[in-house]
Image (tube, grey):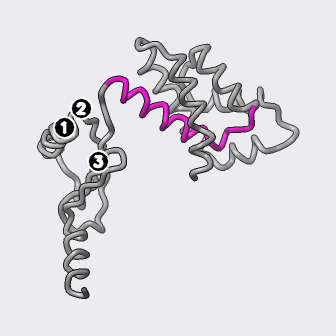
Amino acid sequence: MAELATIARPYAEALFKATSEADQSAWVEQVGALAQVARDPALGAFADNPRVTAEQVSEVITGAAKVALSPAVANFLRTVLENGRLAALPLMAEQYQVLVQARQGVSEALIFSAYPISAAQVADIVAPLEKRFGRKLEAKVEVEPDLIGGVRVVVGDEVLDTSIKARLERMKSALLA
């Protein structure tokens, strides 16, 4: 994983440098669609076939992505394929999105909850976090029943865990110590 991230970083940075602020949201959508298609194991097997050209793989990906690609993003995809970096494309998209969000002063917040939560509850969670981190947060919610109750929030490399599961783990550690 770390190796793919190392491979993906220069590509994401190059794409970011080529992006004007006006094109950012469109390019994030396009690169994200390409990354979604690139995650398919059947596509990876197809791309690894020595009889298949990078142009053929590009056509398959472009057709499956179901979004119109700007010439720059299409060129980016060709470069990735010609260099044999299809496996790193999903990480390139993630890193590119992080760079775009950083430019905009926004970070992604993953909220894991034991139960589905409403938009109002998400807003109640996000408001104090935005003050704590000093930037706007874009929240994504995932249901994780193992938490029992409460939430776990991941912003960048920071984790705030107020779940019942985490509290029980801390109590267990204290009792066993």
Q: Residue at x 63, y 23 (%)?
A: 76
Quarter of the image where one finds residue 69: top right
Quarter of the image where one finds residue 47: top right
* Vertical comparison of 119 with 111: above or below: above
* Vertical comparison of 18 with 92: above or below: above
Quarter of the image where one finds residue 163: bottom left
Q: Is residue 112 left or right of residue 127?
A: right
Q: Residue at x 66, y 19 (%)?
A: 75
Mark 1 and mark 2 lie on one chain; the one further toward the N terminus is: 1
Q: Is residue 20 left or right of residue 83?
A: left
Q: Which residue is the site of mark 3?
A: 141
Secondary structure beneath label 1: helix
Secondary structure beneath label 3: strand
Q: Which residue is the site of mark 2?
A: 136
Q: Nearer the viewer, residue 86 or 143?
A: 86
Q: Which residue is the site of mark 1?
A: 130
Q: Are marks 3 and 1 in contact (CB under 8 Å)?
A: no
Camera-near label (3 vs 2) is 2
Q: State the separation of the CA atoms marked 3 and 1.
A: 16 Å
Q: Main secondary structure of the magenta part?
A: helix
**Which residue type does callout 1 highlight?**
Glu
Camera-near label (3 vs 1) is 1
Q: Nearer the viewer, residue 170 or 73?
A: 170
**Which residue type does callout 3 highlight?**
Val
Q: Residue 5: x, y in percent?
A: 57, 44
Q: Nearer the viewer, residue 24 or 9?
A: 9
The range drawn in magenta is 83-104
Q: Residue 112: x, y in percent?
A: 28, 55
Mark 3 and mark 1 lie on one chain; the one further toward the N terminus is: 1
**Which residue type does callout 2 highlight?**
Lys
Q: Is residue 101 left or right of residue 38?
A: left
